[in-house]
Amino acid sequence: MGKVKCSELRTKEKKELLKQLDELKTELTNLRVAKVTGGAASKLSKIRVVRKAIARVYIVMHQKQKENLRKLYKDRKYKPLDLRAKKTRAMRRALTKHELKLKTKKEICKLRRYPTRVFAVKA
Amino acid sequence: MAPKKTAPKPAAAGSSKAEEKKKPAAPAKEKGTKDGKVEKKSAKPAAKPAAKPAKPAVKKADKPKKDAAKAKSKTASKKAAINKAKKVQTKVIKGAFGTRVRKIRTSVKFHRPHTFRPPRNPKYPRKSVPRRDRMDAFNVIKYPLTTEAAMKKIEDSNTLVFLVHTKANKHHVKAAVKKLYKINVAKVNTLIRPDGKKKAYVKLARDYDALDEANKIGII
């Protein structure tokens, strides 16, 4: 089959990826049968290669899927929880920048009436 | 209906409102209920003298007449007009209170009333994508067994023996074998080996030969 490369997989469509996945999996089952019936060493070493290839296909598939979902939910108000910013639990629960900025009318009046004056001494 | 009402109602202003409501209703409906009208005309003059001297209170006089009228009126629209008039009357009499009707309780028990429970309609799915199914055919069947006992099973009982994922059940195994090897399965027996793996004895349907299938798979 030749080496399965992620860069090649990324150019493929979803259907092609699924087909490739099926092929790799059937190959794996054949190799496993060969292992049980005492197959050649070449076959046995190939098992690892095929397993990793399957993993690569899944990686590319899921990356693409997530990317498309993020595009879909990009400018929506409500996003699924796994598409929201992860940060930390505490940070997610903290006040937003806008909420921190809010001041009461009383406070605004005070600031306006008694601003911090800046003076300079003439040399 | 209209002339009858005007006579005994000097006092209640609200009742007159009701009258006015009825007056436009009555002539509009006269076309539809000629029979009813005729009956009413005959019945009302009789009821009128009977009711007039009997009841001094103006409002009470209305009610039996209303009931009589109600009994005789055929159309639902006339009934609606009467109900409307009654409502207006109670409003006038009692002011801002007294318009709510008390519910009729038919049982001594009180059960929590049923409220509206809408079906779920989320604004966003909690998970962007549901988890993929881990028990696909390739995952269920690990590999076939090639021990002597297994070989015996192939020849004698037309069954194939597989090692299978521990979480797979007989339905999973049946579907997986059908999908991977395209053979019909008669039944599946499973057991868990002492080393923790699950073994499945898959008996094939009559029209399939285990020996041929085993050759195709690669065990032999």
Image (tube, rainbow, N blue to C red):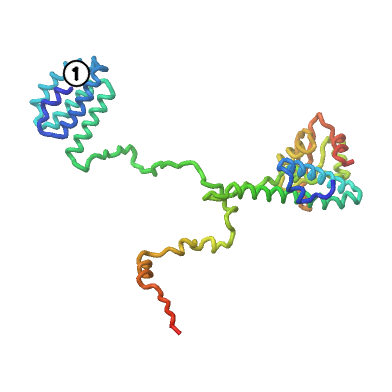
The residue drawn where x is 75% and y is 39% is B188
**Tag 1: Cα neighbours inside 10 Å, few (<14), some, or many (≥20)?**
some
The residue drawn where x is 76% and y is 36% is B178
Type of the residue with mark 1? Lys
* In this picture, residue B66 sits left or right of residue B110: left
Indicate the position of residue B27 as horizontal and vertical percent values: 21, 21
| Image vertical order of residue A72 relative to residue A90, above or below | above
Which residue carries the number 1 mark?
A: B40
Query: Which chain is disc 1 placed on?
Result: B
Indicate the position of residue B146 as horizontal and vertical percent values: 86, 44
Indicate the position of residue B9 as horizontal and vertical percent values: 12, 29
* In this picture, residue B140 sits left or right of residue A81: right
The residue drawn where x is 20% and y is 15% is B38
Instruction: Using the image as rendered, state which of residue A100 and residue B104 is in the foreground.
Output: A100
Q: How many marks?
A: 1
Q: Quarter-wise, where is residue B208 in the image? A: top right
Q: Quadrant of the N terminus of chain B?
A: top left
* In this picture, residue B216 sits left or right of residue A55: right
| Residue farthest to the front, as pictured | A123
| Residue farthest to the right, as pictured | A40
* In this picture, residue B100 sits left or right of residue A108: left
| Image vertical order of residue A93 relative to residue B125, above or below | below
Tell me the SS state at disc 1: helix
Instruction: Using the image as rendered, state which of residue A35 and residue B204 is in the foreground.
Output: A35
Instruction: Using the image as rendered, state which of residue B145 and residue B192 is in the foreground.
Output: B145
Q: Quadrant of the C terminus of chain B?
A: top right
Indicate the position of residue A65 as horizontal and vertical percent values: 66, 47
Q: Quarter-wise, where is residue B117 in the image? A: top left
